[in-house]
Image: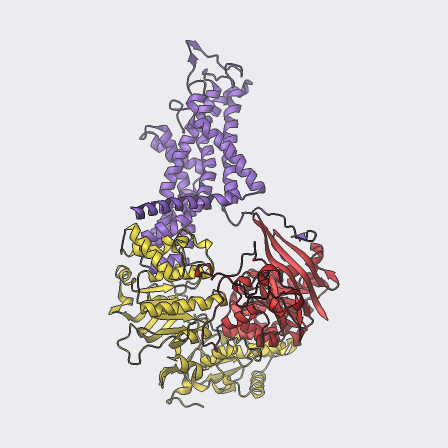
Amino acid sequence: MAAVGAAARSSRRGFGSRLRKLWSPIAETQGLARVMLVAGAVITFFFVVLALFGRWIAPYGFSQYQAGGHRFPQLAPPSGAHLMGTTVESDDVLSRIVWGAQTELKVVVLALVFSLMLGVPLGLLSGYFGGVWDRGLVLVMDAFFAFPPLLLAIVIAFLLGSTVSSSVVTAAIAITVVYVPQYFRVVRNHVISLREETYVEAARALGARPFRIIHKYVFFNVVQNVPVIATLNAADAILLLAALGFLGYGVQPTEAAEWGYDVQRALSDATTGIWWTGLFPGLAIVILVTGITLLGEGLNETINPVLRKRRVVKVVFPGKGTGRVE
Amino acid sequence: MSVVSVRDLRVYYGTPHGPVRAVDGVSLEIQEGETLGLVGESGCGKSTLGRGILGLLPEGAAADGEVVYGGRNLVTLAPRELRELRGPDLGLIFQEPMTRLNPLLRIDDHFAETLKRHEPGIGDAEARRRSLDVLGKMGIPPTRFRQYPHEFSGGMRQRIMIALALVLRPKLLIADEPTTALDVIVEAQILGILADLKAGFGTALLLITHNLGIIAESCDRVAVMYAGKLVEEGPARDVFAEPAHPYTRELLESTISLATTALHSIPGAPPNLLEPPSGCRFHPRCPDAMRVCVEREPVELRLDGDRRVECWLHGPEDQVSDEGRRELVREEIAIADEA
Amino acid sequence: MQTRPEAPPAEAPAPLVSIHGLKTYYTIRGSYVDRLVGREAGLVKAVDDVSLDLRKGEVLGLVGESGSGKTTLGRTLLGLVSATAGSVVFEGHDITKLRERELRKLRRRMQIVFQDPHASLNPAMTIGESVGDPLRIQGITRSRADIRSRVAEVLERVGLAPAEQFMEKYPGDLSGGQKQRAVIARALILAPVLLVADEPVSMLDMSVRAKILELLLDLKRDFDLTYLYITHDLATAKFFCDRIAIMYLGRIVEIGPSHEIYENPKHPYTQALLRAIPEPDPRRSVPRDLPRGEVPDAARPPLGCSFHPRCPRAFAVCGWEARDLRELLEARWAQAGEERYEAERALVGDLAVLETSATLVRIPGGRGHDAGELLTMLESVRAEDPEEPFWRGVRRLEAGHDHVEIEFHESRAPRPLPLGEVEVECHLYDPDVAAT
């Protein structure tokens, strides 16, 4: 019993120390990296809150055009009742922004999960085993990579549109197809360099099977890069989703609010001097994408040991004046 | 005539936990044409000292004290002026030659670039003549002058790097573990070349290494470093024959050579330079430690035969009380704390 | 304090490992075109026909410089690298013929300690996990408690005590010596009979080396292990090993009991290695009479005896070839000064003909120069240093109408010769070869 308890305690301690290992470089950032990290985190967090608590934050539903029997005014400018105005269909812009946040994040997180589940294992296997399968996979992935992303996404969305009922899922799959090659490539390259490490050879010398080596010896060392790529991809994915929505291939308006779609609808309004229907969705896209990018770049500066600049403390020499600092 | 005079040099690295005292008050002199060996184990600060003399310290490091060259203090010199000195006056050779050689440039381009940078008036023919001359002394034939670095073996690249440092005829060459990565026969060849520097070029050499055998064979004088301090210094012959400092003695005994019949090691590990031990930094591991060694840092003493040592065993007599002279009682160092 | 290890009993039973005619060749990937067309650009004979026996309970040293093949031999022995030909028989199994699956089971019995302690441990696993992993990998036990207790036991045995303190640490928190102890622990937890130590102390400080070597000797005694000690450092090998095999470019040039090798080295390469070791004795100065040059490119080894271009005692049949002439000329021109170099270089029409292993070469005369001038130049080189071993290899040196023809003596590959307790591969000791 005691042994089990001890073992359990040790694994928890192990987890805690692993967490501390991850956190320490983040705590030690300074300068520009720190600013980016904090700013990005705050902005992203803000939108995440919007997404999670949309139900309670948004004053109205995403396609609600009336309340209490009264239809909302059409194309009304921002006012007390409608803080960001209304659209031509009498939808409250503010509500659509909030619900839109939920859509964006839902789709992008889904796409991220799919991409990771496909790209990372394929990269691991391909990188470790090499050979004919590896060459083939690389060819396929490079082919996808070579496609203009938006075009590829449209094609996929178009093809899947008829079979898959939920446009949210369709959009997520379309985005996944665009980004899987990136994860595959990054993971594969890292695995190829790690494959030659002494500790991997040591594992072979111990008689470990390839899958165990990949799991215990390669995977955890490779996975460090992934959060950075994932964050930067997320920013890109939001733009891609908005573009799809703009063109009408993304999330369909019947299912959910989507910023890109709103921007497209606002095009005709702009000619008549109505600015609130287009500006707010547009701003939302820009700010969210910027926030996630800042977070990603900040993480990159932090985690990537080459770029990392530890906090440098000015040295004071005891007993004499300060010397020259290089 | 001393080429470089280091006086009470301190190099600290700034960290969030406090300064790491990599070099903590080192003084030494390098005479013209002399080969001084700087020996110590990893983490003792010898590399930092070598780079500190040249001012090649990474960000976050600060230097204090004096490094006098040509009447000027290099520590306080403006970076631009210091840059002018590196090369024509002060040269540096690293352990890994590929760090200095550009894989995209042919060897002749390397030399041309170096010469033209520091001696702008030099003509092409003269540059070629000098380059071939110094390469020849290193055993690199002129037929290979137009090849790329990757076409040479490790040993040859190291010779090219030495040649590149020497072509400017510096007064002082600092070699940081120049042969550690090389095979033993090649190592001996290159040490022979470095030993001939005096004769051929009159260059003083500061040879930084952890290998005592190399120092014994190729250096005039030796300086022993431990935990950022210079514990002993003197003519190589005398120091090896009769080491004054216990660490030097222990290090010599730990060195495995063809004559070794029994293994010897020093218990414990080099100290943490963030919080070095009080008093003498070697006292936790010293077999001859006395009470005073914990209380106060030893002062520098001059011994006969142009030797220096920092150790209470040698006095000065008037500063050590009878109480202080008593043997230090310590708890045994667990293997777990060993290096 | 540890003194010399005890030698195994004189009458040895069947060897633990029997290596016979082992060859490990690597093909070199050439240029892109080569790869496209499927042409092999060359072969590196990392291990070139090595035969030796490893007796139970002994410490056999494998000594050599870079390119000697010692590391590859160690890896091939363990099946980490595939052999090209030959056999490695360990406990009745031929390692070279086994499939990976069967080999894995055998891995319990033979383990390896690597050179770089900082790279041998998985940075993502704690010491406890790393050292305990072999037990899981080999399926010896699954129980967490059992693994933990075995790990604690072996950690204490290698000196990492208290074990609990070290089990939770990551490799990054340990010093070099401590890491190496952990690596040894990991190798030992499976209770192997054979341990290959690949430069186990060369990356550690002097004062730490002795501790790790002491540990290895203790463990050998306590667990009845057999070691294959791979190193470039003859000094530690002398202390640590019972028998020593000196390797050069994939072949064993000399093998015998430690004391014989050190007191009475026979092969010129062994002699040079011993002279070159730095000794902390200031009365010695840097040895000057060392072989010139470096270990040649393993992809294009010299003809005949691989050591002949550097050997001070080489003679007619050692394998002289065109490349040796080129090296001779280059060494001369390095010293000659620019004018002399230019003058002499002009006499040679094409240096590239000297890039081959041919024993009969025609060197065209330089443009505007008579071939006779080239001949005169070569003759004067010979006259300046007639003792240079190269000239003993030249059978004929004549001038044609526009070229100089040089013919070398036929080369013979050296074969292993028994000489008392030692075996040497060197023509100097071959009674069948007349030493001219």
* Residue drawn at point x = 46 percent, y = 33 percent: A238
Question: Which quarter of the rendered picture does the C terminus of chain C lie within?
Answer: bottom left
For the image shown, how many numbered marks are present on the structure? 0
User: Can residue B221 be seen by looking at this rendering?
Assistant: yes
User: Does residue C418 appear left or right of residue A259 in this picture?
Assistant: left
Q: What colour scheme does the image use? A: by chain
In the orientation shown, which residue stands out farthest toward the top? A69
Is B166 located above or below residue A99 in the figure?
A: below
Instruction: Write down the quadrant of residue C411 in the picture.
Output: bottom left
Closer to the camera in the image, A322 or A287: A322
Instruction: Write down the quadrant of residue C89 in the picture.
Output: bottom left
User: Can residue B46 be seen by looking at this rendering?
Assistant: no
Closer to the camera in the image, B292 or A174: B292
Question: Which quarter of the rendered picture does the N terminus of chain C lie within?
Answer: bottom left
Is B158 located above or below residue A55 in the figure?
A: below
Give the color of chain C as drawn: yellow
Residue C156 is situated, as x and y percent measured from the top left of the image, at 37, 59
Residue A82 is situated, as x and y percent measured from the top left of the image, at 50, 16
Residue C153 is situated, as x and y percent measured from the top left of the image, at 34, 58
Instruction: Write down the quadrant of residue B233 in the picture.
Output: bottom right
Give the color of chain B as drawn: red
User: Does residue B98 appear left or right of residue A67 in this picture?
Assistant: right
Is A317 located above or below residue A236 in the figure?
A: below
User: Does residue C66 appear left or right of residue A202 in this picture?
Assistant: right
* Residue drawn at point x = 41 percent, y = 66 percent: C41
Closer to the camera in the image, C101 or C220: C220
* Chain that is purple in the image: A
